[in-house]
């Protein structure tokens, strides 16, 4: 396909049409008259050889191809927007923009809060938006990274994308402060017989895979989509949970839990900031990455 022959304004029109499913509303959204938007729809239909919007009674529905294009158009629009927002120079004290970072609630609690404090002090016009890492991150990494400014995630989950190492952590177990019959160290038999609370995301992580390699099959009683809820679901019960040591130390005062040592040499955790190669030479992204690395550099070893 010859991109030079394409009108990139059609990307804007296509996104509005697919999301609004109404020619008039789509035109109002992008500042085009109804006839101009109808003409854009006609051009798009000729290009794709498909109606894209099919009338169903008094309204329109997306065709099968229109449904496929819905997500792709949103990703393409975000990527184009970021591409043309790229800057040769970036002054954080004067700029006004938003950076979107995908992260788990663990990464936000342990690292994101300090990053936000530093950005608040040094770049008052900069906004940070943290969003939960979707479960599709392993299978759709390129598309997800192209629509974001970065991803906070430990090594061992994704690869083949540029990354800046941030800080180290380790895995520990937490149990209720009044858990009967447990000392300061669990045994492998304890891991097999006691009920577990687990973080339910499938991409997390080498630590979970390590348990399987050791022949340990957790008896999961509760699973939750939040690392920060694990201590609350352990306190006052016989349950155990595997969490990051930094988070356990941060949340221990809020829940009646204590840390116990794993009965094996747990794989280390190395958190990193990942990004799409399209951002590598952008001045604003360079500042973001350098700031993240500087903040991580002041974190004490765990």
Image (cartoon, rainbow, N blue to C red):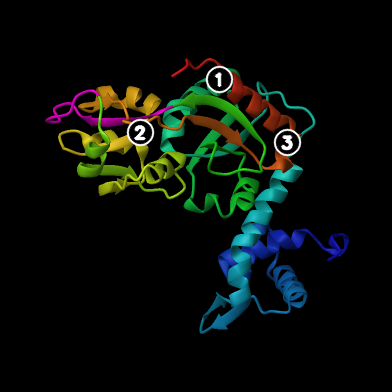
Q: Which residue is mark 1?
A: 295
Which residue shows up at 36% across the image and 38% down it? 227
Q: Secondary structure at mark 2?
A: strand
Mark 2 vs 3: CB contact within 8 A: no
Please identify the dominant SS of the magenta region: loop
Q: Quadrant of the N terminus?
A: bottom right
Identify the residue at horizontal 23%, vertical 23% (top origin): 184
Label 1 vs 3, first from the N-terminus: 3
| Depth check, front residue: 300 or 215 | 215
User: Crowding near pointer 3: few (<14 within 10 Å), some, many (20+)?
Assistant: some
Q: Judge whether 207 appears above or below 4 on screen.
A: above
Q: CA distance from mark 1 to mark 2?
A: 22 Å
Q: Which residues are magenta?
A: 170-184
Query: Mark 2 packing: few (<14 Cα in 10 Å), some, or many (20+)?
Result: many
Left or right of 17? Residue 88 is right
Residue 292 pos. (x, y %): 59, 25
Q: Which mark is residue 243?
A: 2
Which mark is first along the chain, 2 or 1? Answer: 2
Q: Is residue 207 magenta?
A: no
Rendered location of residue 98, percent (x, y): 60, 36
Q: Which mark is residue 280?
A: 3
Neighbours of disc 1 within 10 Å: few (<14), some (14-19), many (20+): many
Mark carried by residue 61: none
């Amino acid at each position: 396909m010859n991109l030079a022959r394409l009108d990139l304004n059609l990307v804007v029109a296509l996104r509005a049409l697919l999301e609004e499913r109404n020619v008039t509303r789509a035109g109002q959204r992008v500042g085009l008259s109804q006839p101009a938007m109808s003409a854009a729809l006609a051009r798009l239909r000729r290009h794709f050889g498909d109606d894209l919007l099919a009338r169903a009674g008094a309204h329109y529905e997306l065709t099968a191809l229109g449904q496929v294009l819905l997500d792709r158009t949103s990703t393409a629009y975000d990527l184009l927007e970021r591409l043309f927002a790229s800057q040769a120079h970036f002054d954080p004290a004067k700029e006004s923009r938003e950076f979107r970072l995908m992260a788990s609630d663990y990464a936000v609690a342990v690292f994101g809060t300090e990053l936000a404090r530093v950005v608040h002090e040094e770049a008052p016009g900069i906004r940070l938006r943290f969003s939960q890492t979707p479960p599709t991150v392993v299978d759709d990494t390129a598309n997800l990274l192209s629509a974001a400014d970065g991803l906070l995630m430990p090594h061992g989950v994704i690869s083949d994308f540029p990354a800046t190492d941030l800080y180290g952590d380790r895995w520990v177990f937490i149990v209720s402060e009044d858990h009967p019959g447990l000392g300061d160290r669990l045994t492998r038999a304890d891991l097999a017989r006691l009920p577990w609370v687990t973080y339910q995301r499938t991409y997390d992580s080498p630590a979970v895979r390590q348990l399987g390699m050791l022949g340990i099959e957790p008896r999961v009683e509760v699973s939750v989509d939040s690392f920060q809820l694990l201590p609350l679901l352990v306190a006052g019960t016989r349950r155990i949970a595997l969490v990051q040591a930094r988070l356990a130390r941060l949340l221990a005062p809020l829940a009646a839990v204590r840390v116990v040592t794993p009965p094996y040499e747990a794989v280390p955790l190395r958190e990193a900031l990942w990004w799409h190669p399209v951002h590598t030479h952008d001045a604003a992204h360079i500042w973001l990455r350098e700031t993240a690395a500087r903040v991580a550099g002041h974190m004490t070893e765990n």
